[in-house]
Image: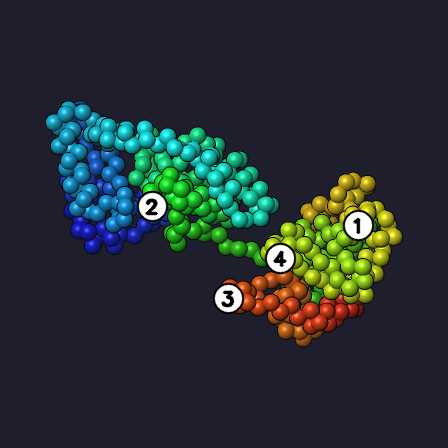
Amino acid sequence: MSLSDSQVRALAAGETRQSKSVGGALILVIEPLNKGGGKSFEGRMRFPPGRQGKQVPVRIGPYGKGIGQWSLKEARDEWERIRAWSKQAGLDPRELKRQEQQPAIQQHTGPTLEQAAEAFLERSTAREVTKKGYRNMLWNQVLPVLGADTPVAKFSWDCNQKDGRNGRQVILDLKAAIERRAPVHADRVLMVLRQIFNNAIDQGWIERDQNPALNSRAIKSKHVPIHHASLDWDKLPKFFKELNANKRATVITIAAVKMVFMTFLRVSSAASMRWSDIDKEQTFIQIPSERMKNAKMHVIPITEPIKDLLAYLRKLNFSQEFVLPAPRGGKGSIHPSTINQSLVSMGYKGLLRAHGIRSIPMTAGQEVLGFPPEIIKRQLAQAIGDKVRQAYDRSEFVEERKKFMVAWCDALLAQGMVI
């Protein structure tokens, strides 16, 4: 049955790959949702002609109105041209595409995908630790699959690979393979690739509207976020009793758990805390921007319980640099994973994670202590308001945060935490 353009446009992607005839041995292929749900045209004919010939597929290109895309009429005209050429030349219909693409492929001697990745990282304004993560991702998981030496232009939508896939299909297949084991990470890979190809477009290495890593709702990973395990306020007395009696963890590890409870720091920031982060009067801890997730310096008012914990750690004299040094004389600070490992050894696997500790003050700070959420969010180093407010609001509410921190630490002591 021949389909009209409006019918083609109305067809929706499903869980499996679909093939719909649009007349004249021209097929509309609809990819499954997990591969983006894209539509493309493909002609099918026997070669050599007759019953003895094999059915060969001839890719026309993606359906649409943009650059490198084909309307239904254009696809039909192109398929008629290819069939007529095949009959006249007596050659496999796929050979016409190969002959016409050969000059373009030979021109793809510009920057390779690896060079495009290097150029993106060089121009990126992301933090060094973020760029290091991008580099590890690209060189360990992406370039070995896509081919580091492949010209970046060959990943365009309208450039077919040797296996018949265009650049968009190659990128989506990579994402689908990663998504099976790590859905959130797959979205991150696509995001980084999108930036690499955008930079390649800016440099003139790929034509505009040819970014193969474009995002859409259809290809968004179907991942349901799971919140970090946390404890209700009334469960803390039992937890602190077990923490105080814990003989399996080192004194530094136990102190690290208490530090996270009192300061709400993420484990990476807490583990890397230096004595130099504390002012001489011991009124504030200032975590530099390079050690904060939001890349902004964070100030923590020092309460009496925090001061007592710092004094206890000073007496241990394990390190002249780190507040929470590596155990047994090791170099550097404790590893960020140490805190979670300690919680697991206490029997709290699935019940409490270090990052889940941060949700306790957000809830109890309002319901138990009666503080406004904005003050608590600022002490958690969370963004307040939309981007406009974040750009113009320079207020820190230090005095209000200090009052909250004093009330919070006193409440923890009342719940059984011992310094």
Q: CA distance from mark 1 to mark 2?
A: 55 Å
In-front residue for pair 336/130: 130
Q: Quadrant of residue 385?
A: bottom right
Q: CA distance from mark 4 to mark 2?
A: 35 Å
Which amino acid type is marked by label 4?
Answer: Lys
Which amino acid type is marked by label 1?
Answer: Ile
* Mark sitting on residue 208: 2
Q: Position of residue 15 (x, y in %)?
A: 36, 48
Question: Which residue is tagged 3?
Answer: 388
- Mark 2 or mark 4, which is nearer the start of the sequence? 2
Question: In what element is the residue under mark 2?
Answer: loop
- Mark 3 or mark 4, which is nearer the start of the sequence? 4
Which amino acid type is marked by label 3?
Answer: Val
- Mark 1 or mark 3, which is nearer the start of the sequence? 1
Residue at left offset 48%, top offset 32%: 144
Residue at left offset 65%, top offset 58%: 297
Question: Which residue is tagged 1?
Answer: 252
Q: Position of residue 201 (x, y in %)?
A: 38, 43
- Mark 1 or mark 4, which is nearer the start of the sequence? 1
Question: In what element is the residue under mark 3?
Answer: helix
- Mark 2 or mark 1, which is nearer the start of the sequence? 2
Task: Evaluate if marks 4 and 2 touch, with contact meaning CB atoms under 8 Å apart.
Answer: no
